[in-house]
Image: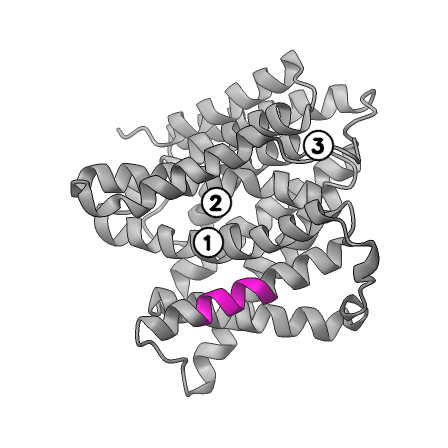
Amino acid sequence: MDNVVLSPSFYKLVLFFTYLVLDCINLTINQRNYLLLALLILIWGSSFLLINRSLLFFSPEQVVGYRLLIGSFVMIFIAFLNGKSLPGSLLPWLHFIIFAIIGNILPFLLIAKGQLSISSGMAGLLMAIMPLVTLILAHFFIPNDKLNRYKIIGFVLGISGVIFILGPSLNDNNNTVFGILLVLAAACSYAVNTIFATRLPSYDPLVASSGVLIVGSVISFLIWPDILYLNFIDLSLISGLSILLLGIFPTAIAMVIYFNIVNSAGATFLSNINYLIPVVAFFLGALVLGESIFWHNLLALLLIISGIVISRFRF
């Protein structure tokens, strides 16, 4: 498994989507939105695969620190090109610290540590529980966002899917219960971050993304100073390329695409990613890394996604 690299089909897929993005100028607004949505799903869905390959050389702490550092450089450059400047007052930076810890450092670390003992596809599948956890938290912390019967049914289905994963994992050498719990904790951290983002003041997307990544990278190198020391002689091409792509695309570029879609098509249109990212992550792991697909994993994926769909029903 350690010698597996990204297959040529993966690179062809990336080049194909890159060509389409460059050709966006010839598309209608609606076509452009769907293209960007597909690109965002591919980028975030492939992040678990890139983490898997990065961990062949880097420690979980190094994966967190360097993806944030690379991402911050990319976002600063993009913000500069768009004429944005970072806040000069203290309060926005205090908010950025909260977002950096809860929405970046903590979940990034939990996912990376979890993927030491579970497959990339399993990690992506488990992250599907995040919107369902957000429903429960929103009931208590966001006014006018209370639970209804559809949300409760959706949450129960999602939890049932997790149980279908946990049971067989007790006898599965490829995925450990501890690794699964770490990734589930990361999903909960993302859910908490979503609540904070709703409750705290909103900022310009490019400014906020840049500020959060800057703060996150600084904190990472402060709490893990040893991640600075790397033996580049032993660094494999696949791990080096994976950490670079992880910092550029899922950490930075995806945020630009995310806010572009929100501004152009709205949050409801964007919510479609919750159904598809776990599917992409799960099957990319099987297609590119040769990870096993079991019937109980497919059933769990179906239950969790069904839970998300039902939770969005209206009276």
Residue 59: x %, y % from top left: 78, 54
In which quarter of the view is residue 80 placed? bottom left
The answer to whether residue 99 is seen in the rendering is: no
Q: Earlier in the sequence, mark 2 or mark 1?
A: 2
- Looking at the rendered image, the quarter that the C terminus falls into is top left
- Name the amino acid, label 3: Ser
Mark 3 Cα-neighbour bin, 10 Å: few <14, some 14–19, many ≥20: many
Mark 1 Cα-neighbour bin, 10 Å: few <14, some 14–19, many ≥20: some
- Looking at the rendered image, the quarter that the N terminus falls into is top right
Residue toward you, 257 or 208 = 257
Q: Is residue 307 left or right of residue 32?
A: right
Q: Secondary structure at mark 1?
A: helix
Image: magenta residue range: 69-76
In magenta stretch: residue 74: yes
User: Disc 2 vs disc 3: which is toward the camera?
Assistant: 3
Q: Secondary structure at mark 2?
A: helix
Question: Does residue 82 sit above or below 250 in this rendering?
Answer: below
Separation of marks 2 and 1 at Cα, in angstroms: 7 Å
- Name the amino acid, label 2: Thr
In percent of the image, x 74 and y 34: which residue is there? 118
Q: Of all residues shown, which one is farthest toward the top?
A: 295
Residue 3: x %, y % from top left: 78, 34
Separation of marks 3 and 1 at Cα, in angstroms: 26 Å
Report the residue marked by disc 1: 194
Q: Is residue 241 left or right of residue 133?
A: right
Residue 289: x %, y % from top left: 67, 29
Report the residue marked by disc 3: 119
Image disc number at residue 134: 2
Give yes or no for contact between labels 2 and 1 (Cβ–Cβ under 8 Å). Answer: yes
